[in-house]
Amino acid sequence: INSPYIAYVRGIEADLQTRFWYLPAPLNGVVMGINYSRISSDATYPFIQEQQAGRNVIIIDSTRTDRLVYQPNDILNAYVGYDYAGFSGRVSFLFQGNVITNIGTYPEQEGFSKNYFRIDASARQKLPWVEGLEIYLYVNNINSEPNISTQPSIGGFTLEQYYGLTADLGIRCTL
């Protein structure tokens, strides 16, 4: 058991996806989508603290409530793309609100990630030689967004991770 206390996660999600098939060519191949989640969470975190009182040590066994660790309040995914014949291309956007990365005894000791915004792109083309054969390209983190964590009480960064841009190019055969 990680914690004897119940954690609560509540939220609402909205999703809209469409292809503009009803528009005149070439606009009838445009696709778009947007997905938004608003989340709230509550978790109870136990802690034990020692305080010196003269020659005595006082043990404080207590709890405090805060957001669930690694649970953002906001997540937004959106894409725009184009489909035509055997081609499909997308540019997508991801926004994730900050998350608590570590819990301290006091709120001032908590660590947070900063808001995260990333841009990705993908393209694939079906090849005419064999049924199920296609070439694809995925490009991730086009804007080279780093993951950054901070602890406001110390006034600085606690972790910075740079993944940079990555790309995958390949051929896929689906049987």
Image: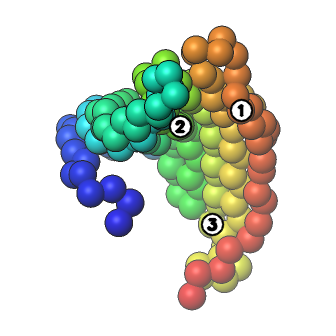
Q: Are marks 1 and 2 in contact (CB under 8 Å)?
A: yes
Disc number for residue 101: 2
Q: Give the SS element for disc 2.
A: strand
- Is 10 or 129 nearer to us in this picture? 10
Quadrant in the picture for residue 171: bottom right
Residue highlighted by disc 3: 126
Q: Earlier in the sequence, mark 2 or mark 3?
A: 2
Q: Earlier in the sequence, mark 1 or mark 3?
A: 3
Q: Is residue 71 visible?
A: no
Q: CA distance from mark 2 to mark 3?
A: 42 Å
Classify residue 14 as left or right of residue 164: left
Q: Is residue 158 above or below residue 82?
A: above
Residue drawn 62% across the image and 23% down it: 150
Looking at the rendered image, the disc whose residue lies closer to the viewer, 2 or 3, is 2
Q: At label 3, which amino acid type do we have?
A: Lys
Residue highlighted by disc 1: 159
Q: At label 2, which amino acid type do we have?
A: Thr
Looking at the rendered image, the disc whose residue lies closer to the viewer, 1 or 3, is 1
Label 3 Cα crowd, 10 Å radius (few <14 / some 14-19 / many 20+): some
Most distant residue in the top direction: 155
- Is 118 or 31 nearer to us in this picture? 118
Residue drawn 59% across the image and 81% down it: 174
Q: Give the SS element for disc 3.
A: strand
Q: Is residue 5 visible?
A: yes
Q: Earlier in the sequence, mark 1 or mark 2?
A: 2
Q: Are marks 2 and 3 in contact (CB under 8 Å)?
A: no
Image location of residue 72, percent across then percent down: 41, 35
Classify residue 114 as left or right of residue 46: right
Most distant residue in the bottom direction: 175
